[in-house]
Image: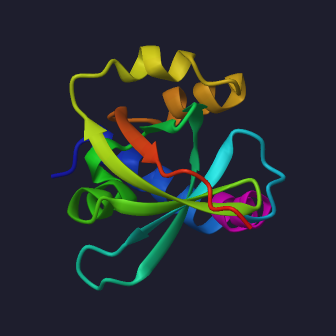
Amino acid sequence: MTSGTERKRERVRRMQRYLLNPPMKGLAWSGLLPGYVLIETRGRRTGKRRRNVVGLHTEGDVGWIVAEQGRHAGYVRNLERHPDVRVRLGRHWRHARAAVIDDDDAHARLATFTQPGHAATVRSFGTELTTVRLELAPPRSP
């Protein structure tokens, strides 16, 4: 039997996958979606590149993501297996090393994000808020 949390997680996953993420990926790719980026992980089983839209708050060369579905999110499971990821900031890719931070207060972290709409959405759709820390590599010079 499935719990209410599992049903909510499945409804949110379907809505994001088929309705919200397709147009948001295009906007994030072009750098037209403030506060959101594409994160590219490597599939934990297939090794294929996987791209997801996530909200990101940066502090210098450190980026923070609050995963609304926690370790149930495919991209979080992928980055746990393969922590070397790429992040599309604006119109440029940067390499990063990702880590799930278990002892961080995800609600407090979310309050530091500059897009209040993003924080509200994550809180309402989220079932297991989890913080992900990205160590961003220096940008490549042209």
**Residue at far left of view:** 1
Foreground residue, 46 or 7?
46
Foreground residue, 43 or 3?
43
Main structural element of the magenta stretch: helix, strand or loop? helix
Foreground residue, 97 or 51?
97
x and y percent of residue 62 in the render? 48, 36
Q: Which residues are magenta?
A: 19-28
How many labels sit on residues? 0
Residue at 36%, 33% (x, y): give it: 131
x and y percent of residue 75 in the render? 38, 60
Residue 131 horizontal side relative to residue 92, left or right = left
**Residue at far front of view:** 141
The colour scheme used here is: rainbow
x and y percent of residue 4 in the render? 30, 39
Whether residue 35 is in magenta: the answer is no
- Considering only vertical position in the picture, is 60 above or below 137? above
Foreground residue, 90 or 61?
61
Residue at 21%, 64% (x, y): give it: 81
Residue at 32%, 34% (x, y): give it: 128
In the picture, the quarter occupied by the C terminus is bottom right
Displayed quadrant of residue 10: bottom left
Residue at 67%, 46% (x, y): give it: 36
Residue 22 horizontal side relative to residue 94, left or right = right
x and y percent of residue 52 in the render? 53, 62
